[in-house]
Amino acid sequence: MPLREIKALLEASSSSLDLVKSLRLQRRLLEEKRRQVGLAIQAIEEVEAELKTAARTAPNFSALKKIIEIMERQTNMEWTKKYYSDEAQVKIAEKAKTFTPEMQAQVTQQWNELVRDIETAIRNNEDPAGVNTRSLGERWAGIVRGFTGGNPEIQKGLNKLYADQANWPSNFQKPFSDEVYGYMKKVMAAHGISCN
């Protein structure tokens, strides 16, 4: 939290409870950042140790890949934080601690399969309100709920994020096309499916 924001909070705070809550949230966010940096340092140390013990002149590329993935994970999604409240960021950070690479691979596979099925439905001109599309909406909502955990603050941030696609970084690769997103909004509305 920048110093000017702390100052404004202190001046506007009607009770020390507001300040305690804000400081607790900031502490949790910093702890998560420290954990991420710790993972990057650990990966670097592993490569250094391997190079020393194996007396290698060329690094193990799988270990270097791991370092790059950890570092990219930290920076690639940093821009999304502005859409989430402090409370939502803390919840996301806590969830990230238990989210393994295997879980990430599974979710990525689920999204990819779902997006392929949606693209097929679009190509086949399936009515978003049709019987066959209900399962697409339920799968979509299930994956989103897996991310939000049903937390309304996280859902609110996610909604803000997707409402502001025009301002996403140009180098960010969307997980699905605008056509897929627009179609699924119609499916969800037609079947009364909510991600909450």
Image (cartoon, rainbow, N blue to C red):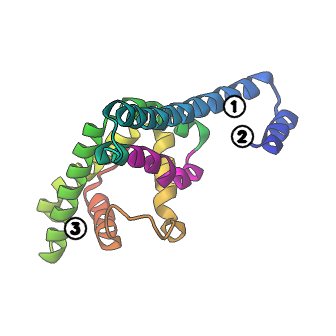
- Image position of 182 with respect to 32: above or below: below
The answer for how far apart the CA atoms under marks 1 and 2 are is 9 Å
**Pointer 2 local density, CA inside 10 Å: few below 14, some 14–19, many at least 20:** few
User: What percent of the width, then of the height, locates residue 14?
Assistant: 83, 29
Q: What residue type is labelled 3?
A: Pro
How would you classify the magenta stretch by its main secondary structure?
helix
Residue assigned mark 1: 22
Q: In this view, does 112 lie above or below 26?
A: below
Count neighbours of disc 3 (C-alpha within 10 A) and say few if under 14, some if 14 to 19, many if 20 or more. many
39 or 185: which is nearer to us? 39
C-beta proximity under 8 Å, tags 1 and 2: yes
Amino acid marked by disc 2 = Met
Look at the image and say whether residue 72 sits in the magenta stretch: yes
Question: Distance between the Cα atoms at labels 2 and 3?
Answer: 44 Å
What is the magenta range?
Answer: 67-84
Dot placed on the residue nearer the N-terminal end, 1 or 3: 1
Kindly state the secondary structure of the residue where label 2 is placed. Answer: loop
Q: What element carries label 1?
A: helix
Tell me where residue 54 sits by quadrant.
top left
Q: Which residue is drawn at 51% across and 65% down?
A: 168
Q: Which of marks 2 and 3 is in front?
A: 2
Instruction: Identify the secondary structure beneath mark 3.
Output: loop
Q: Residue at x 44, y 64 (%)?
A: 172
| Residue at image mark 3 | 128
> Badge 2 is on which residue?
1
